[in-house]
Amino acid sequence: MYCVHTTALSHRFSASQQVLKEIELAVPTGSIYGFLGPNGAGKTTTLRLLLGLIKKQQGEILLFDQPLHLHRLQLLRQTGSMIEVPSLYGHLTAKENLLIWQKLYQCPKPHIAEALQIVGLADTGNKRVRQFSLGMKQRLSIATAILHQPALLILDEPTNGLDPYGIIEMRDLLKTLNTQHGITIVISSHLLAEIEKLVTHTGIISAGRIVFQGTLNELVSRQQSESQMILQTANNTEAAQIVKTFVSDVVINAQHISMPLLSKEKIAALHRALVQHKIDVYEMNAIKKELETIFMELINQTKHD
Amino acid sequence: MTNSFTNCLSAEWIKKRRSFSSWLVVVGACFIPLILTIMFLVYPKQILDLHHSGQFWRILQLRSWETMSIILLPMGIVLAVSLITQIEFKNNMWKQLHTAPVPFSSIYFSKLVLILLMLAQLFVLFNIATYVSVWIPALLNRDVPFPLYAINGTDVLKENGAYFIASLPLISLQFAISLQFKNFLVPIGAGLVLVVGGIIAHSWKYVYMLPPAYTALHFGEASGSTKHTDHNLTLWALGYFVVFVIIGYLLYVNRKEKG
Ligand SMILES: Nc1ncnc2c1ncn2[C@@H]1O[C@H](COP(=O)(O)OP(=O)(O)OP(=O)(O)O)[C@@H](O)[C@H]1O
Ligand SMILES: [Mg+2]
């Protein structure tokens, strides 16, 4: 079952520029979904559409299997959000800020203290939010988003401006919310590395198009399949014949033979075979592609479309 | 709807805490009475004349409302209404507010009602401060008698009510404008142009059609200095109010980007 599901979602702010092109987002219930893409790819626009902040032009948006435009209030009641920069009333205290949302969501008052506790802002007292550090503001925004204990959390770059320690803290917090409270989380980011350790699923958007969507494992196996191995021996021609008995996709260059990355067992077997045929092995190297490289390639493909 | 409206209104009430607009209410209410007090202390003859007039409260009321109705109240409305909506713009709050599970109508009308409540607050404080302004000289200066005349409560209420209604069109117009612009200077500028325009047009024969001039026009009627009495200002004011509230609402809900 999908918690968020969009079909053929397109959007343009002006006639000349189509910002989103047939976005098909499928966020499984209970997942942490990393929504990745470079600056200007359309992440924020997509998330604003999901929250009904901009008027839908084309396509379908389902939250909890229900169309957003028909059940806006009911669906928003189960959703918490934070879009781009923190939204907080600077002249009020942390508690007063949450009091406002407690009124609007009509949730029990003790939630305020709980939410402040969870994000570690329990003792800011009478300090005005205006005087908070950026990290404190980010955390208070998260407290706002989780105050009414939503089933879905939509966060647009929540780690923006956090120091490495803050990023780790945020990651742990989101993991806890997901595993202990079963909250589905959609989180956007520029950097795969930043959310790689957090997410279960990813969607990669580039220039308004989804270029990859699936589990993190699927992305990793794509990484495997695109990694290469290099072999250099005393007799490359003869060695290539042996390699071909293991894998068909072999290229012989002047210096070396290259092939797709083999499994550990196959590497050992290949090595044994080469030794048996008395071919001296000078170099056997796996050139693993970084996950980040895969990500960059996916993005670059669309840029040159 | 009523439920979400009251939720929104209590949320608005919290947002008002320590905000500049809530200070404006207090300052705006006390400014003229304070000047009156100082004047009565420095020139006791002024208050003695008032005592000899035989219409102590009526004339005091006219004196305190004079500058208030012509300049301070319209300017104050422009400033306070813009500040109230600015709270959301300045803090990037619209996107958060519009993802709360409340209808847009509740948000719009709770803000409007908050502004009207603040106006009522202003009037109450203003009347109290005016009352205090004549007691202080009497307490401090033994030559000034205490104002022990009976107050005509109905008259005070009627006058306040008339100024309240006369303020409605400008409030609703300013509200509609300031909801549209993120840049604070635009609604403030537009509002000031309206108010100054109203003052300049004071003796124009069609001035009864200009909402920003209504409080001043009512003062003219009450003091007997101008007569536009062939037009029912109250009806004009209420008519404009309804029209501006509806236009403002339609502009607000039809905004393509809600944050
Ligand atoms: N309100 C707007 N009016 C016009 N164009 C807009 C508006 N908001 C966004 N855009 C355009 O839409 C495109 C996508 O912007 P969006 O903010 O969704 O990107 P993003 O993926 O969130 O980028 P970033 O990582 O920088 O936050 C950009 O080209 C941007 O210029
Ligand atoms: Mg963005």
Image (spheres, coloured by chain):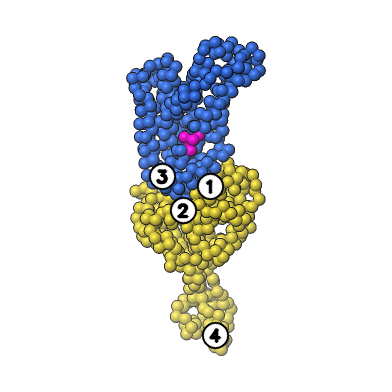
Chain colours: A yellow, B blue
Q: Amino acid at mark 2?
A: Thr
Residue type highlighted by circle 4: Ala
Left of A58 or right of it: where is A44? Answer: right
Give the quarter of the image for residue B198.
top left
Does the magenta portion include B117? yes
Chain label for disc 2: A
Gap in angstroms between the C-alphas marked 1 and 4: 67 Å
Left/right placement of residue A282 relative to residue A18 reads right
Q: Find residue A100 and name its label.
A: 1
Picture coordinates of residue B139, whole percent (x, y): 64, 19
Q: Which residues are magenta?
A: B114-118
Q: CA distance from mark 1 to mark 2?
A: 25 Å
The yes-or-no answer for disc 3 within 8 Å of ligand 1 is no
Of badges 2 and 3, nearer the viewer stands: 3
Which mark is nearer the camera, 2 or 4? 2
Tally the numbered discs.
4
Instruction: Tell whether label 4 touches label 3 (CB within 8 Å).
Output: no
- Measured in 3D between alpha carbons, the distance from the residue under mark 3 to the one under mark 4, in whole angstroms, is 72 Å
Q: Nearer the viewer, mark 3 or mark 4?
A: 3
Chain bearing mark 3:
B
| Residue corresponding to mark 2 | A44
Residue designated by label 3 = B105
The mark that comes first in sequence, 1 or 2, is: 2
Q: Residue at x 58, y 63 (%)?
A: A176
